[in-house]
Structures are given as structure tokens and as C-alpha cells.
Image (cartoon, rainbow, N blue to C red):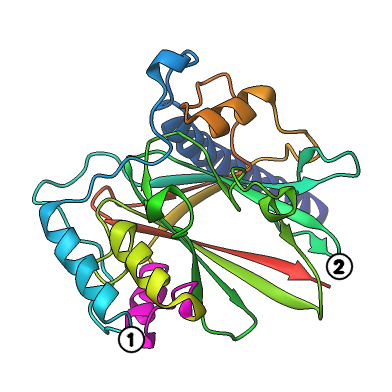
Amino acid sequence: MHSRLILSLSSALILCGLGVGLAHNQEDDEVRGAFLSSRDKTTNTANTAKPRHKTRVPGTAKTANSNVAKNPNTSGKINANTSSTAAATPIGLGYTLFKRDASGDAVRIDPASEFHTGDRVRISLEPNVDGYLYVFHSEGDGRPEMIFPDWRLEDGDNGIDAHVPYDVPSGFEKDERLRWFTFYGNPATERLYIVVTREPLASVPTSEALVAYCAANKTKCPWQPAPEAWAKVEEARKADVEVVASTNYGQAQTEKEKVATTRGLGLDQSAPAPSVIRMSASTKAPVLVTVLDLIHK
């Protein structure tokens, strides 16, 4: 009897574990499906290509950004403006970390990998909504600085289009060495904050405001948010998010991905899925914050 009880309990625990596993797999499939199904079914052509960055600044945003240019250390709210009509689609972000191999090709790598001096990486970002993209970088406990938008590229514009991939650093840099993050110096944790919003962040300069500020204050660029404003980003990252990851590491970047990135084309449903997909649990969330830690050993 005792042995049978143990066997019965063990069987029950195994079945329970399988149930949990199946539930998780179903949730993962739902998140992945929701993200990928909003891609176009077929490949876009050059005739339907969109600009690399589409400015969609509402009337109030220009004033807010212009004020930041005059006073970049403002402690104004960093929350994105909310629309009167709630969006039906939750904000999602797919990202893939690529590492430069010995031949110069971009190969998918696990973001949790340890990196060493001389390693070069680049991150490809794929939003599922039209909106705005911001990328901040900090090292260790250092103060974050905004590395995208960049006042030197696309006139500081940071408008994004759904499912059009964006590389950080930009593949448009003339110097090939600047197309990658290169690890050097002392070991540290390089942290990237990737912020996707439906509306511009009120206290962050972009476009003309960013260009004007950096042209007049080159030693203070990349631009750094004030501590009070940055606390809003940290708060936003606590929102509930669904996450699903794939295991396609080791695969080279496809030609379709390269073309989509360089020509501003939307990825279709036949293109590889991003290595990691993160999606807001709420359709009403105006901001999605993703934190990526790159470990330099």
C-alpha cells in the first residue's frame, strides 16, 4: 500500500507538472502568435517601403520637446501622453542580439551569454505598433544616457513603424566599427533600457529639439535624463509583461532581415521570429520598457 501510495503521488505530481508545462507552452504560443500574426503575410516591395523613421509628433509634443532643448535637465514627467481612445493592441517588442563572428557576419546569440573584450554585438528591435523608440545605456551604477535617437542620424527622429526592424547601433554608420557595440576595458554590466511608446515622452528631446541641443552642447551629448524623470522609466518597467523566448541561437541573420533593416521594410510572417518577444499584459499600457543586461567578463 505504501509503495502504491508513493507511486500514485508521483504520478499525480508528474501529471500536474505536465499540466503546468502545457499551460506555459500554450501561453507562449499565444504571445508569439499575437506578435507574429500582425506581420504582413507577404514580403513588402521597394514600392511600399516606408521611411526609416516616420515623424508622427502631435501638436503638443513639439512644445514639450522644445522646452527640453532649452532646459534639458527638466524634472517634468517622463510618462507618455495617453490617447483618449485606448489602443486595442498591447505594445510588443521583439528583439534579437547579434554577435559579429570572425567572418564579419551577424549571428544570433543568447542575451544571457558572457562577453569578453573585443566581442562585438548589435541588437535588432522589432516593435508591433507604430510609435516611438528610445534606447538608454548605463554601465554599472552609472547615470543613463540616451543613445537612440541620435542627433547625428535621421535628424534625431525616433518614430517607428510596426514590424520594421531597427538596429542599435545603426547599420547606417559609415565606419563599420561604429555599427557594433564593442566590449573593452574593465569587466562590467552594460545595461540597455529599450522604451517603446505610443506617444512621445514628454520630457525627452527628439528631432529638431535634440539636434539643436546637441549642436549647442556637444560635450553634454548623449543626452542624460534628470534623476526625477528617470524614476518614471524605472517605475514603468514594473508593469506586467508577457515574455517568450526562442532557441534559434547560432543562426546567421537572414538576407530578408538585412534587407528589411536597411530599406525600412516590414518583416513578413515567413521571416524568423525575434529571439525574445515581450508584450504588455494590458492593451491600455502607453509604454513598454525592456531592460537588457550584457555581461562583460
**Position in image of residue 185 (x %, y %):** 81, 77
Q: Foreground mark, 1 or 2?
A: 2
Compared across the picture, whether 178 is left or right of 220 comes to right
- The one nearer the camera, 81 or 65, is 65
Does 24 sit above or below residue 265?
A: below
- The magenta segment: 220-237
Marked residue nearer the N-terminal end (1 or 2): 2
Q: Main secondary structure of the magenta part?
A: helix
Amino acid bearing label 2: Thr
Compared across the picture, whether 218 is left or right of 162 comes to right
Q: What residue sits right under mark 1 in the picture?
A: 228
Residue 113 inside the magenta-drawn segment? no
Q: Residue at x 32, y 56 (%)?
A: 207
**Position in image of residue 198 (x %, y %):** 27, 50
Identity of the residue furthest to the front in this view:
216
Counting labels gives: 2
- The one nearer the camera, 127 or 86, is 127
Identity of the residue furthest to the right in this view:
102
Q: Secondary structure at mark 2?
A: loop
**Cβ–Cβ below 8 Å for labels 1 and 2?**
no
Q: Residue at x 73, y 36 (%)?
A: 248
Q: Residue at x 52, y 34 (%)?
A: 29
**Position in image of residue 13 (x %, y %):** 67, 51
Determine which quarter of the picture holds residue 214. Answer: bottom left
Say the numbered circle drawn on residue 117.
Answer: 2
**Position in image of residue 58 (x %, y %):** 16, 51
Image quarter where the C terminus lies is bottom right
